[in-house]
Amino acid sequence: MTRHSSNIILVLVLALFCGNAAASSVDCEVTTIHASSAGKGVDPALQAFAGVLRKKPFSDFDSFELVGKRSYKLELAKPVALKLPAGLSGSLTYRGPVKGMLSLRLELSPAGRAPIRIDGSASPGAPLFAAGFRETSGTLVFAVACRDIGLQLVQ
């Protein structure tokens, strides 16, 4: 076998392996934000989201305060319970990679109301936003950002 043909075989083997690899777990950060019309601007702790928060639909508010931020490790197709502000419960599920993006399911259950399920995809590290949970003084917004941390071979 020539050196050229062995290089082609190596490339084919790598392509087969990489083409069948999928992230088996992701690290996610769930950021809870209180949006209101209190005139306070964007909390310095939320500067990474400032550009998004100044656009519709968030531009209806002029104050964004950090309520909480928690990290979670998600395994493929296994829901993880979220620790959320009082009155809310929820879960986050990593559904796998889709066209270079991470597919997620965020389920939120406001006290006394039917659960809300949000299915979406985001590039690794980019946030997926969910909003509209009204409180007396404003609205809760959730930003979920995940990164690949492991690969498994998919047959």
Image (cartoon, grey):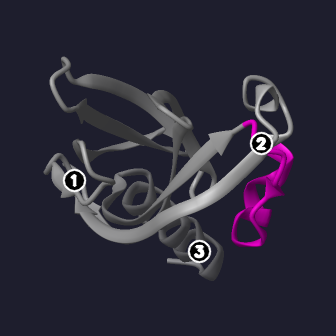
CA distance for labels 3 and 1: 34 Å
Residue visible at 35% across and 52% down in the picture: 20
Magenta-colored span: 37-52
Q: Residues within 10 Å of mark 2 (few under 14, many from 20)?
A: many
- Image quadrant where residue 90 sits: top left
Q: Quadrant of residue 103?
A: top left
* Tag 3: amino acid: Asn
Q: Kindly identify the residue that appears in the image at 57 percent across and 57 percent down.
A: 124
Q: Is residue 69 above or below residue 129?
A: below
Q: Earlier in the sequence, mark 3 or mark 1?
A: 3
Is residue 19 in sight in this rendering? Answer: yes
* Position above or below: 115 against 55: above
The residue that mark 2 highlights is 53
Label 2 and label 1: CA atoms lie apart by 30 Å
SS at mark 1 in the image: loop
Q: Determine which residue is flagged by label 1.
A: 76
Left or right of 57, for residue 79:
left
Q: At label 1, which amino acid type do we have?
A: Leu
Quick one: label 3, few (<14), some, or many (20+) residues within 10 Å?
Answer: few
Q: Is residue 38 above or below residue 3?
A: above
Residue 77 falls within the magenta-colored stretch: no
Q: CA distance from mark 3 to mark 2?
A: 49 Å
Percent of width and height locating residue 26: 36, 64
Residue 7 disc label: 3
Residue at 21 percent across and 24 percent down: it is 115
Does residue 29 appear left or right of residue 39 in this picture?
Answer: left
Magenta stretch contains residue 39? yes
Residue in the foreground of this view, choosing between 4 and 68: 68
Earlier in the chain: of badge 3 and badge 2, it is 3
- Name the outermost residue toward the top: 114
Hey, what amino acid is under mark 2? Leu
Q: Position of residue 65 (x, y in %)?
A: 65, 57
